[in-house]
Amino acid sequence: MFRVSCIQLKSNNNIHFNLKKTEKLILIAIKQKTDFILTPEVSSLFSLNKKQLLKVCTSMKDDIYLNGIKKIAKKYKKWILIGSLIIKLTKNKLVNRSILIGPNGKIRSFYDKMHMYDVILSKKEKYFESNTFFPGKQKKIFNLPWGKIGMTICYDLRFPNLFRSLSKKGSLFLSVPSAFTLTTGKKHWHSLLKARAIENFCYVFAPAQSGTHYNGRKTFGHSLIISPDGAIIKELKKKEGVITALIDPSKSKKLRTIIPSLKGD
């Protein structure tokens, strides 16, 4: 058994401000005796402006936000998954990267978002992430002290084969840090997350961005911790904050024994 916490943010374009806010919420989670903390997608910098991102983003080694969170993880001896940061690989190459930090303050794994959010929701609401980011090519699973976690980011949620692959390889938990749009979130967020949990008999940890951001983009919020049977254990609707829940890894294993659907593929 262990405790997991999901942090909900409304990040802006100020890395230092976002770091201070995240640190404050992490300390709240720690007071709740959590073991594992997750933040949303693009925690440090909320922008799709490639020129701005290329100007301010850095390598992992030099990232201000990442180094700040590493210090907290080490100080309090906690596992922390930064939902995602925009990392600069080369002069013109950016990736949307989820980073797992161990209780020793060191990076234990990272995952680059594979599926780019290229959609036209309406004449006014369009997104083309592939104009800004390079897609990842590798699935990532890491063996936490309580079991394996499969790492995903936001739009990956709409690709069930990815989640099936992660669960077939032994993942008991799935991380889905997100910045879901208000438009699609209202229609699909809960249904998709519950479906991924039920299909794979996995716990789903989904920290989210929430609110109207400085650039006018609206995100849905509703950070969720979902049981392997699809039940919502904890939910934070709109405000920034923290949700924490007690997790029993044996529940996934029991459900997979009762209904051996993972063996049917």
Image (cartoon, helix red, strand yellow):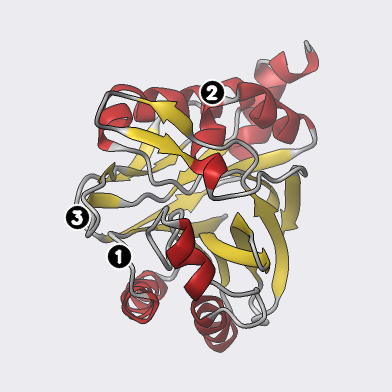
Give the residue drawn at x 60%, y 28%.
201
Separation of marks 2 and 1 at Cα, in angstroms: 34 Å
Under mark 1, the amino acid is Asn
Nearer-the-camera pick, 161 or 45: 45
The answer to whether 64 is drawn above or below residue 160 in the figure is below
Separation of marks 2 and 3 at Cα, in angstroms: 27 Å
Residue 190, image quadrant = top left
Residue 58, image quadrant = bottom right
Side (left or right) of 191 relative to 60: left
The answer to whether 248 is drawn above or below residue 215 in the figure is above
- Which label belongs to residue 119? none
Nearer-the-camera pick, 123 or 81: 123
Q: Residues within 10 Å of mark 1 (few under 14, many from 20)?
A: some
Q: Which residue is mark 1?
A: 12
Separation of marks 3 and 1 at Cα, in angstroms: 15 Å
Q: Are marks 2 and 1 in contact (CB under 8 Å)?
A: no
Residue 228 shows in this picture: no
Q: Which residue is mark 3?
A: 239
For marks 2 and 3, give the one nearer the viewer: 3
Counting residues from the start of the chain, the first of labels 3 and 1 encountered is 1
Instruction: Please identify the quadrant where the C terminus is shown.
Output: top right
Residue 225: image location, x then y, percent: 42, 44
Under mark 3, the amino acid is Lys
Q: Which residue is mark 2?
A: 198
Residue 100: image location, x then y, percent: 63, 64
Give the residue drawn at x 37%, y 59%.
46
Residue at the top extreme?
Answer: 264
Instruction: Please identify the quadrant where the N terminus is shown.
Output: bottom right
